[in-house]
Image: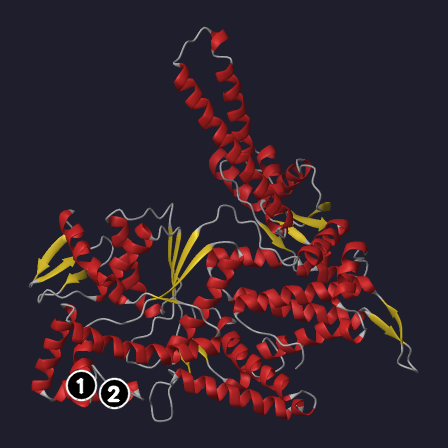
Amino acid sequence: AFQENEIKLLTAEIERLKNFGCLGVSPSLEGLRDENAKLKYRLNFLQKSLQEERSKTAKSMININSCLQEIFGAAIRAAYPDLENPPLVVTPSQQPKFGDYQCNSAMGITQILLKTKEQKVSPREIAEKITKNIPANKCIEKVEIAGPGFINVHLRKDFVSKQLSSLLMNGVQPPAVGKRKKVVVDFSSPNIAKEMHVGHLRSTIIGESMCRLFEFAGYDVLRLNHLGDWGTQFGMLIAHLQDKFPDYLTVSPPIGDLQAFYKESKRRFDTEEEFKKRAYQCVVLLQSKNPDFIKAWELICDVSRKEFQKIYNCLDITLIERGESFYHEMMKDIVKEFEDKGFVQVDDGRKIVFVPGFPVPLTIMKSDGGYTYDTSDLAALKHRLCEEKADILIYVVDSGQSVHLQTVFAAGQMIGWYDPKVTRVAHAAFGVVLGEDKKKFKTRSGDTVRLIDLLEEGLKRAMDKLKDKERDKVLTAEELKAAQTSVAFGCIKYADLSHNRLNDYVFSFDKMLDDRGNTAAYLLYAFTRIRAIARLANINEQMLRKAAKEEVLILDHEKEWKLGKCILRFPEILQKILEDLLLHTLCDYLYELATTFTEFYDNCYCVEKDRQSGQIVKVNMWRLLLCEATATIMAKGFDILGIKPVQRM
């Protein structure tokens, strides 16, 4: 609408310039030509971009909730034009007798009228006034006022049927989200020379899924791995490397177990004074970019990278490495910028920055002249905002870092790097992984659980489960292997993502591999079953595509209607997650979709067979199309969650 309005204004302006001569105005001819050319260029650009937007929007899945909000927003403005920002509440109905959606704005408007205008009007009266002002639209069949002032909305069947047909013909298209924005997501972020453990699992899985969601919605996403690859710990690692592998510059050192190597160097650092002094000297030489020490640092980093990559390959994770070392050269300028703007105080030789509203200051330089995590986090924040030009910046980091990150974000605002009204900077915090004893997840010996061990255990348990179900007798070796990895890694991811990330969650292989309830095992099995329906009826993809163009989806049975509406709620679910970054909502939706499908399948014959011979006598194609629409949405949901379904399980 904005673009259309600007096109009208520009067209009028071009006409005005053409008529300058007869208006008695004599501006410079060159200036006039330049102005006219600029306006025409802008007009062409806007018309082209409007065409592209319309073409994208035509294919986008309609967010029915947003459509209803627009309709009721217009009705409320028409009914109460003097009200500023009246409440707009539209939600799916919980029971069929209350229609398909409900608008519950009348109660809020009653309160506003009473407070601001001292008018006592009943919610029911307000609801009646709203319904009288509902503009003409394509989606509402009828509205009813219930109880004190709830407006029950019944959707038109032909509208829902057309949206389902569009989904089948165009595939799952992202909801229209407006201008393409740049999103930077900071996730995973293990430390060099330390193995990834169960604590890294949540950040890695949640971050990957968020990236997939924003990418599907059409955003430009930069996935960053903020590795702990710089700092004083490298002094002791390099000193230990020199002692253990003195020829490391010419012969690649066979560091097999980097965790053991780290522990050895740490023990020496804590017990040998001479070694400790040498470790500090190594840090100075590394930070001054001595080539031999840079080589040692790179060797240690490479060993870690290979180990991290094994895990990323298993979990299908894509990241761009940009560790603390990337920002090292920028830190001097960060300190200077805070000093120049008068934010720095000196405390016992340290340079600190107090941020209003936060009791603990940021230490941006230590008394020995070294930098801290605070400095590197500020440098990273500035680079992402000012160099990468991020519109949205998301840190997927555990809840324990909340105060630190909020302080860093507030410092960025204070110094003027971003305006929170324009740029969204969010901490997507998450709780810890607990064992079945409800304590922090540890091995029996009390060590942190290595992530690679956890994934291998998942593979073993998934294979045991498949063999218990005698799947090894009906699947080929290749199909069995595909089912094993799908179930193992799918279940580990889903168990995490299906819990509200803000809460701690209990890690239990038994629960996550259960094929009943809200688990990946249940959903993957439901998906393969749905995909098999058309195959067993000898209906191939080509036949389904042809039917999608020709068949009208009949939604006369209450279970067909319920399933059709559930399928079309997908865009509003995604829109909600783009706003609150809570991925368990998608898991809850997929489980609801699978159970709604089961109700439909149990009550509506898709394929009718002769009871004696078992021969197919009738294929209800519109119902097969509902099966296909369900599977299509589930497949996209799995893709966003990073879960790979299989055709046979």
Q: Is residue 122 above or below residue 320?
A: above
Q: Is residue 229 above or below residue 18?
A: below
Q: Are marks 1 and 2 in contact (CB under 8 Å)?
A: yes
The residue wearing badge 2 is 261
Q: Residues within 10 Å of mark 2 (few under 14, many from 20)?
A: some
The kind of residue on which mark 1 rests is His
Q: Point out residue 252 in the picture as x, y percentages from the top left corner.
A: 26, 84
Tell me which numbered mark, 1 or 2, is placed earlier along the sequence: 1
**Identity of the residue furthest to the front in this view:** 250
Residue at the spot 50% in from the left edge and 63% down from the top edge:
212
> Could one spot residue 437 in this view of the protein?
no
Provide the residue designation for mark 1.
240
Residue 370 in sight in this render: yes
Identify the residue at image location x=11%, y=55%. Answer: 345
Residue sitting nearer the eye, 10 or 369:
10
Label 1 secondary element: helix
Q: What quarter of the picture does the N terminus occupy?
A: top right
Mark 1 residue crowding within 10 angstroms, few (<14) / some (14–19) / many (20+)? many
| Residue at x 48%, y 73% (from the top left corner) | 316
542 or 354, which lies in front? Answer: 542
- Residue 65: % across, % down: 61, 51
Q: Is residue 17 left or right of residue 288?
A: right
Locate residue 526, reporting x and y percent: 67, 75
Circle 2 SS class = helix
Q: Quadrant of residue 236?
A: bottom left
State the mark number for residue 416: none
Left or right of 177: which side holds 426?
left
Give the CA separation, mark 1 to mark 2.
8 Å
Residue type for callout 2: Phe
